[in-house]
C-alpha cells in the first residue's frame, strides 16, 4: 500500500468482529470481500482495490455502482485526492420479507 496514503486510515481491522466498525466508518476499503457488501448494506461508503479490474465483477456493489473500484496506483491516488463519495440511496433489500415468506409458506 502506498506509504503516503496510509495516514488516511484510522483503523485496520483483521481480527475483530467488524460490524460496529463497518457502520461507524467514514469509508470501508477492501478487495471484493463480504465486508464491503456488509458495509454497503449499512450505508457506509466503500472502496474496492483490486489488482485485476475484472475482479470487481465479483462484488455486487461494484456492479451496482455503489462501490467505486480502483486497480492502479494513479486511480487510488485520484480517489483519495477527492472528497469521499456520498452515502448511497440504494435500497439493497425490499421491505416486507416476513410477509412475503409467510405468504409463500401458506401456499403449501
Image: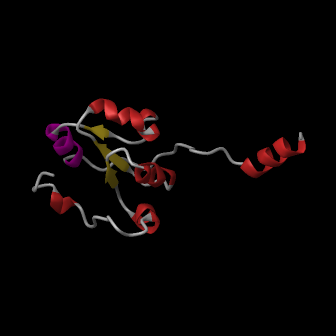
In the rendered image, the residue lying farthest to the front is 108
Question: Is residue 96 toward the left or the right of residue 71 in the image?
Answer: right
Counting from the top left corner in percent of width and height, residue 23 is at: 45, 62
Residue 79 in the magenta stretch? The answer is: yes
Q: Quadrant of residue 7?
A: bottom left
What is the span of residues highlighted in magenta in the rendered image? Answer: 73-80
Q: Quadrant of residue 26?
A: bottom left
Residue at 46% x, 38% y is 60
Counting from the top left corner in percent of width and height, residue 9 is at: 23, 61
Residue 92 in the magenta stretch? The answer is: no
Query: Please, what is the dominant secondary structure of the magenta stretch?
Result: helix
Residue at 47% x, 53% y is 38
Quick one: quadrant of the C terminus?
top right
Residue at 42% x, 65% y is 18
User: Vertically, is 72 above or below 41?
Assistant: above
Q: Nearer the viewer, residue 67 or 56?
A: 56
Amino acid at each position: 500500500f502506498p506509504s503516503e496514503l496510509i495516514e488516511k486510515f484510522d483503523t485496520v481491522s483483521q481480527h475483530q468482529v467488524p460490524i460496529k466498525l463497518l457502520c461507524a466508518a467514514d469509508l470501508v476499503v477492501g478487495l471484493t470481500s463480504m465486508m464491503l457488501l456488509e458495509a454497503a448494506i449499512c450505508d457506509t461508503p466503500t472502496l474496492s482495490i483490486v489488482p485485476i479490474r475484472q475482479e470487481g465483477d465479483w462484488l455486487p456493489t461494484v456492479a451496482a455502482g455503489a462501490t467505486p473500484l480502483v486497480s492502479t496506483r494513479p486511480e487510488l491516488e485520484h480517489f483519495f485526492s477527492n472528497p469521499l463519495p456520498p452515502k448511497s440511496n440504494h435500497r439493497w433489500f425490499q421491505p416486507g420479507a416476513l410477509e412475503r415468506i409467510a405468504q409463500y409458506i401458506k401456499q403449501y
